[in-house]
């Protein structure tokens, strides 16, 4: 799959939208303003109603992303809404920085398309014209959060502005919540809703497994062991001072002493022992000896 994306990026990369998350934030703001000015307009004319789409209202396949964020429902404060926007902006911009503009575009747009497919599945089985309303922005945003938790598991946020929590624990919590949704729907006999939820999150499922090459992980571990063995041999007979860095990014030069949240990996495509931080692992140019 990664090779396929590489080929796509070479052909279509110039069409990728830079800073996509800024445009998405703008869409969120428009949706919020619309919900304040005309609370029912979105559900009557813009929501993902597959029956209406089949009757010719095809714009709903795009306009459903104007759905107001859950933080704007029930009269939630503007401050909390702004905090939510800032949080999603951090998620999106950091993922784009880590993956590159094209891959982030593919991830987000595929999330939108999969949500449409999920709505079609539920409508085809249940015949409920409003079933598509369950597949607005919720699962797209959850897929962003889960991807960020997988990319930066040790990044720390302040829950309720007080309690420090690592992203991996938030990811576990949200993952358990999604599984609970699937189980509850399946137990209630709503198998299509359970399947539709899985379909809506397939972009994250694809990401999670396609970015974890177990053979590569094993090779990296073996190469790391050899590198550490050579380093220890070179340092034998010398006293190592406390605070000496063990890892250094070949691009930015940062070490674990500069930022304890940084993670370092060796690149299997580079010839030689080149180590990169998590911000440059996916964006650097591969080094060859030829």
Image (cartoon, rainbow, N blue to C red):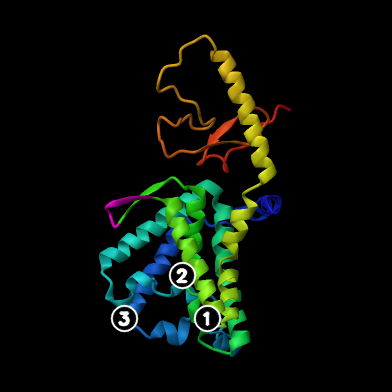
In terms of secondary structure, where does tag 1 sit? helix
Give the magenta range. Answer: 160-165
| Disc number for residue 177 | none
Residue 232, how many percent across, how many down?
56, 18
The residue labelled by disc 1 is 132
Mark 3: few/some/many CA within 10 Å (<14, 14-19, 20+): few
Evaluate if marks 3 and 1 touch, with contact meaning CB atoms under 8 Å apart. Answer: no
The label nearer to you, 3 versus 1, is 1
- Label whose residue precedes the other's in the sequence (3 or 1): 3
Queried whether the magenta region covers residue 74, the answer comes back as no
Query: In the visual, does 64 lie left or right of 1?
Result: left
Q: Residue visible at 41% across and 29% down? A: 257
Instruction: Report the quarter where the C terminus lies.
Output: top right
- Label whose residue precedes the other's in the sequence (3 or 2): 3
Residue 151, how many percent across, how many down?
51, 49
In terms of secondary structure, where does tag 2 sit? helix
Residues under labels 3 and 1: Cα distance? 23 Å
Residues under labels 2 and 1: Cα distance? 12 Å
With respect to residue 83, does 246 lie above or below? Answer: above
The residue labelled by disc 3 is 37
Query: In the visual, does 207 lie left or right of 147?
Result: right
Q: Residue visible at 40% across and 35% down? A: 259
Instruction: Report the quarter where the N terminus lies.
Output: bottom right
Residues under labels 3 and 2: Cα distance? 22 Å
| Disc number for residue 138 | 2
Query: In the visual, does 272 lie left or right of 98?
Result: right
The label nearer to you, 3 versus 2, is 2
One can see residue 154 in this view: yes
């Amino acid at each position: 799959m990664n090779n396929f994306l590489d080929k796509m990026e070479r052909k279509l990369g110039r069409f990728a939208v830079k800073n996509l998350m800024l445009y998405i934030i703008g869409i969120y703001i428009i949706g919020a303003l619309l919900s304040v000015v005309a609370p029912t307009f979105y559900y009557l004319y813009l929501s993902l109603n597959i029956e209406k789409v089949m009757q010719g209202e095809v714009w709903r396949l795009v306009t459903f992303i104007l759905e107001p964020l859950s933080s704007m429902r029930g009269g939630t404060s503007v401050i909390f809404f702004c905090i939510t926007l800032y949080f999603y902006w951090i998620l999106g911009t950091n993922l784009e920085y880590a993956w590159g503009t094209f891959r982030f575009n593919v991830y987000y747009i595929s999330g939108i398309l999969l949500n449409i497919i999920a709505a079609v599945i539920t409508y085809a089985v249940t015949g409920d014209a409003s079933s598509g309303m369950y597949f607005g922005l919720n699962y797209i945003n959850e897929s962003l959060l889960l991807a960020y938790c997988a990319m930066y598991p040790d990044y720390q946020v302040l829950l309720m502005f007080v309690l420090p929590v690592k992203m991996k624990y938030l990811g576990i919590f949200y993952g358990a919540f999604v599984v609970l949704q699937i189980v509850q729907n399946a137990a209630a006999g709503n198998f299509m809703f359970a399947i539709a939820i899985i379909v809506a999150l397939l972009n994250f499922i694809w990401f999670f497994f396609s970015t974890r090459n177990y053979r590569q992980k094993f090779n990296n571990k073996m190469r790391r062991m050899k590198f550490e063995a050579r380093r220890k041999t070179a340092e034998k007979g010398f006293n190592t001072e406390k605070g000496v860095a063990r890892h250094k990014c070949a691009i930015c030069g940062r070490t674990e002493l500069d930022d304890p949240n940084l993670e370092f990996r060796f690149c299997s495509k580079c010839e030689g022992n080149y180590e990169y931080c998590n911000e440059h692992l996916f964006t650097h140019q591969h080094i060859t000896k030829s």
